Every structure is written in structure tokens, then in C-alpha cells.
Image (spheres, rainbow, N blue to C red):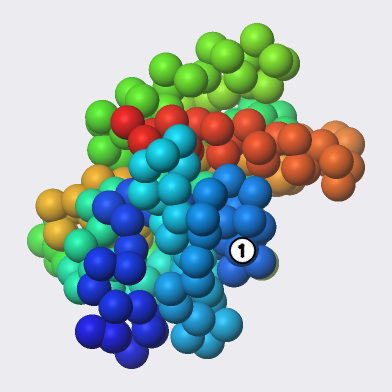
Amino acid sequence: MPTPHNSAKLGDFAPALLMPGDPLRARRIAETVLADSREVTSVRGNSGFTGTYQGRPLSVMASGMGMPSLTIYATELFRDYGVKRIIRVGTCGGLSSEVEVGDVVVALGAHTDSHMNVARFPEINYAPVASWPLLEAAMREAPALEAEGVKVHVGSIMSSDHFYFTPDGLNERLAQYGTLAVEMETAGLYAVAAEFGAEALTVLTVSDHLLVSGPEMTHEERETRFAGALRLALAAAMS
Ligand code: ADE
């Protein structure tokens, strides 16, 4: 304490932590959601914040992009700082034809092309899955969101190491098998939570669709839809 990537002291982080990908998004969440927010770390410009939400402690810190980056931060938060649950709140690209830009996706489990969990389990295909109590708490908030016109999906996603490269036909096959969307972090998050006996959940806003062309989200739509995903993430964090 501190760790190579975190300058906070023991006790600076709350047991529950929201984890967007983008450090600026983390700052924005801290400014708009937390009361009495204070910056507890800022190594490499990746600031972490702790404050309260509805009178209870809550922290926010970004993962950066991809499983290696997320796994570094999450390992140190679980192992060294006593964080008990991390809720990733990010964006994804739609795969399933059921999913539209602006919808919310809650990740039950995450397929991956990453080697990170193969290194943990060379003998088997490890299945990274969400923490059921967190998933259940998030989904209790879903009907309220749907009543406001935001569709919420729960199912499997793909966590990819590549943003710009996909093997021919892979996205189509994943969609055929009911995979809702692709992002780059969740298979790492769910495995590292399991490693430390902690809890994790991913709640995503669909920012683009890889297989169905349609209108892009406006900046305002992006913000309102992200706020919807954040509501589910907060319900899980505070459960
Ligand atoms: N996150 C948001 N959109 C994505 C995409 N198309 N691929 C991977 N991650 C994403």
C-alpha cells in the first residue's frame, strides 16, 4: 500500500465500486452521483473517487481499455484495498438482432478470445459468470427503466482482445448462439472477482451495432441511455 497503479491508502475505497472504462467518465460519475466525493488516487491520470450515495459509501475508478488493464486495477482493489464488489458500467457493440443501439445489456456470462483465463485454467474452457445477487439486484430495477422506454437484455456477451479485427464469420456465429454484444473487459473482471471470492457485474449501453445498420445515437441519447445503465449498476452496487 500503495500499489504500483494506485496511490490510495487502505480504507480509502468503499466496499462497492463502479468501474467505467474511461477515466473522464469516472470523474463525471463521481461529480454527479457521489456526495462528498474525494479523489483517493490519480496514478497515470486514472483517478479513483470515494464518496457516498444515499448515505452509504461508494467508490468509482476506471478500468482503462481491455482485460489486461482492467485486471490490474481490479486485482489491486480486491486484493490490497478490501473492495468486495465491482460493477462495470460501460458500452458495447450489438451482435444479436434483438439488440438495438441505446438498449441496455446486463452480462450473465462472457465468452472470450483472450488468453488470460486460459493461463488460469489451461485444462478447461473456464466460464466467467456474473455474481447472481448483483445481477438479481440490477434486474429488479429493469422494469422501471423499461417503463421509460429503455429495453434491458440479460444474457451472454463476448469480451474481445481486438476492437478492429474479427475472424471471418465469428460475430455472425456468436449472434446465432444468442450472444448479445461485444466489449473488451468482462471475462477478465468476472474471473478476477472469482479469484478473490468477490462479486462482479457488468451493465452496458449499446453504443453501436456490428451486424445491423441503423441510426447512431446522438450525444444527448448517449447520456440518457448511459444514465439508465448507471441506474441498474447503482441498484447492484447498493444491494
Ligand atoms: N465497445 C463499444 N463498441 C464496441 C465494439 N464495437 N467492439 C468492442 N467493444 C466495444
Tell me which corner region of the image, top left, top right, bottom left or bottom right, holds residue 145. top right
Which residue matches tag 1? 27
Q: Position of residue 161 (x, y in %)?
A: 49, 67
Instruction: Identify the residue shown where x is 42% and y is 17%.
Output: 140
Q: Position of residue 113 (x, y in %)?
A: 41, 61
In the rendered image of this protein, does residue 190 appear above or below residue 77? above
Indicate the quadrant containing the C terminus: top left, top right, bottom left or bottom right: top left
Q: Is mark 1 within 8 Å of ligand 1?
A: no
Instruction: Identify the residue shown where x is 44% and y is 48%.
Output: 52
How many residues crowd mark 1 within 10 Å: few (<14), some (14–19), many (20+)?
many
In the rendered image of this protein, does residue 10 appear above or below residue 44? above
Q: Is residue 228 visible?
A: yes
In the rendered image of this protein, does residue 57 appear above or below residue 224? below
Tell me which corner region of the image, top left, top right, bottom left or bottom right, holds residue 237. top left
Q: Is residue 66 visible?
A: no
Instruction: Identify the residue shown where x is 45% and y is 55%.
Output: 51
Counting the numbered discs, the total is: 1
Q: Is residue 74 left or right of residue 26?
A: left
In the rendered image of this protein, does residue 148 appear above or below residue 131? above
Indicate the quadrant containing the N terminus: top left, top right, bottom left or bottom right: bottom left
Instruction: Identify the residue shown where x is 50% and y is 66%.
Output: 38
Tell me which corner region of the image, top left, top right, bottom left or bottom right, holds residue 225. top right
Q: Position of residue 12 (x, y in %)?
A: 32, 68
Inspect the image, locate mark 1, and give the three-letter code of the amino acid beneath it. Arg
Mark 1 element type: helix
Please name whichever residue, 189 or 16, is drawn nearer the observer in this view of the structure. 16
Q: Position of residue 121 (x, y in %)?
A: 15, 63
